[in-house]
Amino acid sequence: MTLGGGKMLIRMVRPERAEAATPEVRPASPVSRGREEVHRQLVTQVRDRVVAELRNAGDVSDPEAIRRKIGEVYSDLLRETGLVLGRGERDELLERVVAEILGYGPLDSLLRDDSVTEIMVNGPDKIYVERRGKIERTELAFDNTAHLMRIIERIVAPLGRRIDEASPMVDARLPDGSRVNAIIPPLSLVGPVLTIRKFARVPLGIDDLIRLGTCTTEFMEFMRACVVARLNVVVSGGTGSGKTTLLGVLSSFIPGDERIVTIEDAAELQLRQEHVVTLEARPANLEGKGQITIRQLVINALRMRPDRIVVGEVRGAEALDMLQAMNTGHDGSLTTAHSNSARDTIRRLETMVLMAGMDLPLRAIREQIASAINVIVHVSRMRDGSRKIVQVAEVSGMEGDTILLQDIFLFKEAGFRDGKVLGQLEPTGVRPKFMDKIQMAGMQLKPEIFGYTMAVRGRG
């Protein structure tokens, strides 16, 4: 069975011989191992009979009709086998059958769980999740390797992709926007590996980041002024540090009367403005043709009369085109980059520009970076799993061959208590050189934001 857009197509497959289930990891159920085996056999029987009956009925594209058929077959089999189930047990098994035929098997419950931000499957019997920044192992499992492969194929088939020994890696996206990566043997030595970065139904906003301790109100006021004043901002950080989330929040500061073009590998940004054009890169097809890269989309975006260009992440030669756009009138652009600090972001940008193959001297590259980038915001995932803004730096020019950075905000850690990192993002007392641009944009920032106050003398 494959899912494609709003239409559902049933692709009949010959039932595969079941492999022995791994006994060490059991689904989260109050039943014994023996009873769980009975449950698995019942689920398999219902699935096989439903598939056979739908095949005889021809093309069935109505999910509700399929769900009704599942219910009928399920009830019939319970009567035939004489298996007695409690109401809760009966309902749980029915949902497992529905997930097996219409959804993604044992992953369905995790995809519905809003507390889960990432799902990691290391072979059929090891399913991990990330909750609140911490990784934990679940008690869920696939029946066997063939079961896991069926779910992976169900994800990638609607996108016209394939995964097999000839093409053992694939990137895909679920209908809700969640990002999926799959890699299988012979590249993976632990069996098929599936990683799902879940798509937030309701993206985090300004108040959420402040409440979670990711940043402060003063930081948000400062960044609002930077975005409105059309300063070019790079959000940097490691994998899973919250770069895209922060980029989405900063993008919300863009005035609603501007034309915004977003460019991403997999569309994740959920901008609320009305005039937004969303572009998404495209991988090569089965014949290895038709690939559209981020770099091609950045070049094309310049011809679309954008007021702002927001690139989900620069990781290669597109960095050169992004810098040139920032230097040729497309101020106010936003992007993210993988790095370990603001200074490391500069080095990463230099490397990415060199990947464009233009044979530019290093000083010329650094001059481009220094004149294009205004602010680098570095976000980090702390050891307690929380995400925090740890550095906000201004790119203040060049001295010799060195790009100058000065910190505007720094996170000061105050200890570790009850499993939580203590501390806060604090101003350094430095007034950025681009304050004139902010004031010319009509934005007024209180001196307290930068850690100093204006002494006012007089009576009264």
Image (cartoon, rainbow, N blue to C red):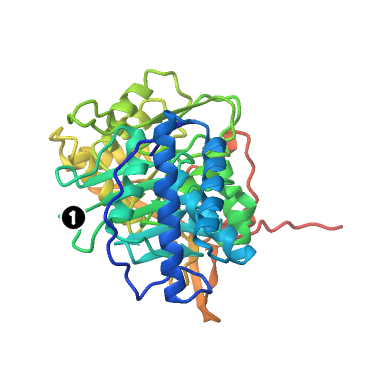
Query: Mark 1: which amino acid?
Result: Pro
Question: Does the image show residue 374?
Answer: no
Residue 385 lies, in percent from the top left, at: 47, 68
In this rendered view, identify the residue nearer to me: 406 or 238: 238
- Secondary structure beneath label 1: loop
Which residue is located at x 36 percent, y 56 percent? 239
Residue 269: image location, x then y, percent: 48, 39
Look at the picture and state if 267 lies above or below 80.
above
Foreground: 90 or 364? 90
Please name the residue that numbered disc 1 is placed on: 185
Report the residue that reaches farthest toward the right.
Answer: 460
Q: Residue 94: x percent and y percent? A: 54, 54
Q: Quadrant of the C terminus?
A: bottom right
Q: Where does the image place residue 429, in percent across and percent down from the top left?
A: 53, 60
Residue at the (18%, 40%) spot, across then down:
355
- Seen at 51% across and 65% down, the residue is 132
